[in-house]
Image: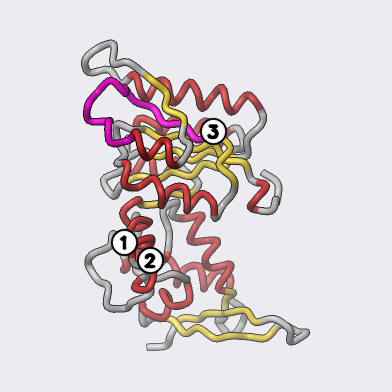
Amino acid sequence: MSENNSNDIKIAVLIDADNVSDKYIKCVLDEISNIGMPTFKRIYGDWTKPQLSSWKTVLLNYSITPIQQYSYTTGKNATDAALIIDAMDILYSGNIDGFCIVSSDSDFTRLATRLREAGMMVIGMGEKKTPKPFISACEKFKYLEVLANQSEHPESSDSSEKTGSHKDGMAGKRELIQSIKTIINEISDEDGWANLGEIGSRLNNRYPDFDTRNYGHQKLRPLLLSLNHFIVEARRTSKGQNTHYVAKIKER
């Protein structure tokens, strides 16, 4: 995908109503708006089922197109099949830059892999119960509980007092610290300093679900400082007009 302005990135948002609560839709669309423009907004389910009735107002308010899929056979997930077929149709239309698959279901693992093979950006969003294979298949994965908490309590997201209530993600804090140390050792200069932006990029490559908000912080710099293993400093560029951050491993 080319380096476009985020407003030019066209994203197909496909939602599995069987595996996502309507309470998350606002934070899903808010998060997507930070990345690009949701050109397609479709949600899949058997709308004859009474348990999906709560979606009616949400779909109207957010202009999401419901796709009816009857459950023809007990034990077979026709909703998944309908979403997958639509995703491939959208892919071959050539009018999209990426996909957001909103589900906690591992059945979409192969779909995410196939879309990435076609050069698509694939963002997954699901609850913390989402199986690891689907998370790993996505380029980026966002936890719905974290997004919802951020939306409801933005002022508390950088609080160092938040412990235990969030999911560390694919990397627990001990593994995260070791990964950051490895990255710094790989990319640091002779004095041991590494660019903070490059550290973040490599963490994103290692862990599709890496998000500083999973650890209770809005940005990477306060997260590194909270781990107590790293030093972070601001540096001026050669022309002195801009500031960037560098980090090194704290000597013990």
For the residue pair 21 and 221, the one nearer the viewer reads as 21
Q: CA distance from mark 1 to mark 2?
A: 9 Å
Q: Secondary structure at mark 1?
A: loop
Residue range (magenta): 40-55
> Residue at horizontal 67%, vertical 29%?
94
Q: Which is nearer the N-term, disc 1 or disc 3?
A: 3
**Label 3, label 2: how far apart the Cα atoms are:** 28 Å
Residue 131 seen from this side? no
**Relative to 181, is 12 above or below?**
above
Instruction: Say above or below: 153 vs 45.
Output: below
The answer to whether the residues at label 1 and label 3 have Cβ atoms under 8 Å apart is no
For label 2, count other residues whose C-alpha is less than 10 Å away and answer few (under 14), some (14-19) or many (20+).
some
Earlier in the chain: of badge 1 and badge 2, it is 1
| Foreground label between 1 and 2 | 1
* Residues at circles 1 and 2 in contact by the CB criterion of under 8 Å: yes
Give the structural element (helix, strand or loop) at label 2: helix
The numbered mark at residue 115 is 3
Q: Looking at the picture, how far across and down is residue 25, in whole percent?
A: 39, 45
Which residue does the numbered mark 1 point to in the structure image? 168
Going 43% across and 43% down the picture, which residue do you hit?
124
Query: Which label number is shown at residue 176?
Result: 2
Give the foreground label among 3 and 2. 3
Choose between 28 and 228: the one closer to the eye. 28
- Residue 127 visible in the displayed image: yes
Q: Secondary structure at mark 3?
A: helix
Residue 169 falls in image quadrant: bottom left
The crowding category of the residue bearing disc 1, from other C-alpha atoms within 10 Å (few below 14, some 14 to 19, many at least 20), is: many
